[in-house]
Amino acid sequence: MKHVAITLRDRLASVVEALGYEFIGCELQRQGRGSLLRIYIDSANGITVDDCSKVSYQVSAMLDVEDPIQGAYTLEVSSPGIDRPLFEIAHFNKYVGNKVKIRLLAPIENRRNLVGMLVKVESMNIHLLIDSEEIVVPFSEIEKAKLIA
């Protein structure tokens, strides 16, 4: 997965929030000869297909004008779902006490994939309880993370 440039992420967030939705995050993945830009949105009332369509239309217009992604890409707008992705340190703070799955950029204790209880967030470190052992993961080392239902 390729992280979306901060300027593009901020632009996407402003479009989504201007429409009245919460911008959860986004990811850009290579897909064959093109890319997939996936944007996660939420609202207090949940997300419908119409909500995704409305955001997709507005984001597409912005992307067509600004053209920030090289080559062909597919835009996908989605609710975060049950296995909610965690993009920001604030997301981890919000879900302390829940089970999470984390993929690391490089192995810690010979493991690149971690599944455990999110115990606490301290500074920029995530504390996981895995098999009664607490493992500290620097936020900067996380490639991808999500809640597990």
Image: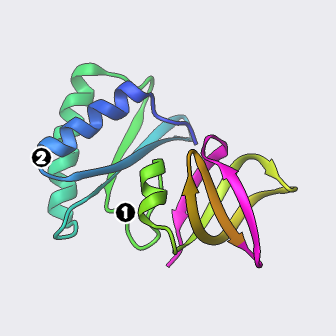
Segment colored magenta: 130-149
Q: Where is residue 87 drawn, in percent x and y? A: 47, 49
Color theme of the render: rainbow
Circle 2: residue type: Leu
Is residue 2 toward the left or the right of residue 6 in the image?
right
Q: Where is residue 9 drawn, in percent x and y? A: 36, 34
Task: Determine the residue located farthest toward the right in the rendered image.
Answer: 110
Circle 1: residue type: Pro
Check disc 2 and report the residue beneath it. Answer: 19
Q: Which of disc 1 and disc 2 is earlier in sequence?
A: 2
Give the camera-side residue of 126 and 6. Answer: 126
Is residue 71 toward the left or the right of residue 12 in the image?
right
Q: Where is residue 84 drawn, in percent x and y? A: 43, 65
Pointers 2 and 1 in contact (C-beta within 8 Å): no
Q: Secondary structure at mark 1?
A: loop
| Residue at (44% x, 23% y) in the render | 70
| Residue at (40% x, 45% y) in the render | 26
Give the camera-side residue of 129 and 144. Answer: 129
- Per the image, is 136 magenta? yes
Quarter of the image for residue 8 reads top left
Task: Characterize the magenta stretch by its predominant secondary structure.
Answer: strand
Check disc 1 and report the residue beneath it. Answer: 80
Quarter of the image for residue 132 reads bottom right
